[in-house]
Amino acid sequence: MKLLFVIGALLSSIAIFCQSNAQDSASLLSDSSVKLWKLGDYKNALAVINRSLNIARKTNDSLQIAKCLNNTGLIYISIGDPVKSIFYYEQSLKILRVLPKSKDFPTSLLNIGIAYKEQGIYDKALNYLFESVGYFEEWKDAKKQSSAYNAIGNISRIEKNYQKSLEYHFKALKLRESINYTEGIAGSLNSIGVVYKELEKYDSALIFLQESIKKAAKGNSPTEHLANTLSHIGSIYVKNKNFNYAKKYYDSAYRIRRSVNSKKGIAYSMLELGELNYVSKDFKQAEKYLLLSIKSAEEVNASDVLLKCYTILRKLYKETKNYIKAIEYDDLFIILNEQVLGEEKLKSLTQMQIKYETERKQDEIENLSRDKKKREAELLAQELQLQSKKVHTRNLVIVIILLSSILVLVLILFRIRNRFANRLDMVMREMHHRVKNNFQVLLSIFNLQLDHIKDKESKEFIRSNCNRITAMMLIHRELYFDKEITTVKVSDYIQTLVENLLTAYELRKRQIDIRYEIDESISLNVDNAISMGLLINELVTNSFKYAFGADNLHPVLTIILTKLASSHTLIVKDNASDSDKVIFNKSFGLKLVETQVKLLKGEMKRFTSDGVEYRIIF
């Protein structure tokens, strides 16, 4: 008995020693992968971190597994694959939440928040970022806390909440100044400058951007971030029509991008210089820089730069009356735009598939490992226990396997259902996006024709059709961006539609009092929303064309939409004078209005007691 105890103790000591060595190896490999990541060698960094992860799983070192998963996420975010990055961050966070809290936990929250920001999923990003701030504040990690504030500020800027954006960028700046974090201070100053630039407060923007340059200049060597700051300053001078200063800063940005061999940056600098020369009417130089930008952008497949170049070139050739070239770049823009949309769709589908396969394989590995350990434990128990307990153990194992199988089957069915629902949602959004793009192409073609048509009646006919297309296109745009893909919230849609008509008929300079009384809770299905949009388009167009003549000194347009029980009431009313109460009895517009009223299964009445009022109940 004593001999067996000694042998058991010896084997236990050897196992602990081996496990300790394995854990050290996993930690060293993880550190090596971080060094490779910082050097930009992402391929080898992934290979090394995978080895570290395998060792950590074999030793069941939960903290090291979480660190490896987090580092894998860092590598994928640098590669430009935020979907995989988020997957690995989520896996890391799932483990860290059940472990005693360490500094790795809020760092993981910060990383996943930034990854969601890069994907444009701002609500989730903000949840993780705000959660991380609490821990960083508690543990006095000012550097990472400032990074979280900076990310929150950037999201607020993207969402046009500029006041909140400035609040968090100034918080980040204060923290970075308290720890003398020079690079971070330069970044915060740049971010604040960009917010002021978007607010069109150019003097304030220049102050902060210039300060950012001074801080960045204290670094060892110029960086792409410094080049971006110089570009922002250049763009402000373009806005102020100070083209000489703009060129000076654009040239400085270009030199830095050449020195760091940023091919996309070089393409962007050529684009900036091309746009500068286009705005300053030096079309020859503009053409030269834009063609150089296209050449550089094609080398690195920078589609965003190419699309901007094509847009400016088609305007340039149009202004220089080189219509063949204008049409050529118009076609290139349309083709590339469609290609980019297709690539994004394919990439999204591929990423979803990879994510699903990765989850499935990881579950299989964990299930196999769990089953293997369970079988070993059962065998050991059977050897040590009495013969009478064997049948009981065997039956227990069978029950567990059956329950596990049922659970796995339920999980698989649940995932299949979720995948189908997600794909259906994606297909519907893609359909609305395609329809919107096709309408946009039609509008581009009509607008191109307008420049060549002299006949006023023909021009008016095409402009009216453009407005009708816009009314339908806005529906599909709302459906593409909204969470709900089958109904349209009409409040924002109606106001956007009227704003477009104001622009189309060049009435923004007139002080037209437009009054909205719209129930914001009203949503309509796609067909009814399109019919109502065409109705409003025709009635508002009629008011703009006939009701607001020169003798109408205080033009007023009122749009009311209410809901009562199962019916809706739409009122479009103007204050036309007696001489302006034009009845379009035989016009195409009236026929279209009557057709849409029938489609809505409603009825329309017209009143002329105080202006002209159309009341539709449907």
Image (cartoon, grey):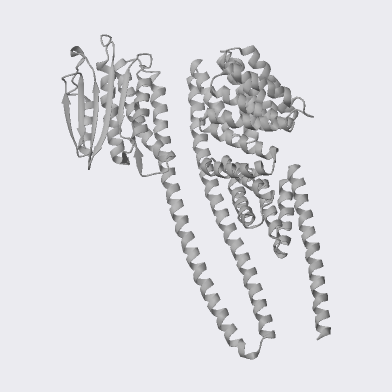
Q: Is residue 128 above or below residue 375?
A: above
Q: In front: 94, or 253?
A: 94
Q: Quadrant of residue 523?
A: top left
Q: Residue at x 24, y 32 (%)?
A: 570
Image coordinates for residue 102, horizontal then vertical, percent: 69, 51
Where is residue 68? Give x, y as percent: 70, 54
In this view, the residue in front, 377 or 475, is: 377
- Give 571 or 3, whichever is nearer the viewer: 3
Q: Is residue 238 left or right of residue 464?
A: right
Q: Residue furthest bottom?
A: 388
Corner quadrant of residue 467 = top left
Where residue 496 appears, as percent x and y from the top left, is 37, 28
In the displayed structure, 433 sits above or below 447; it is: below
Q: Quadrant of the N terminus?
A: bottom right
In the image, is residue 483 above or below residue 247?
below
Quadrant that contains the C terminus: top left
Viewer can see residue 594: no
Residue 298 seen from this side? yes
Residue 240 at x, y percent in the picture: 57, 14
**Which residue corresponds to the image point at 48% horizontal and 20% vertical from the top-left?**
323
The residue shown at (65%, 50%) is 105
Comparing 31 with 39, the one in front is: 31
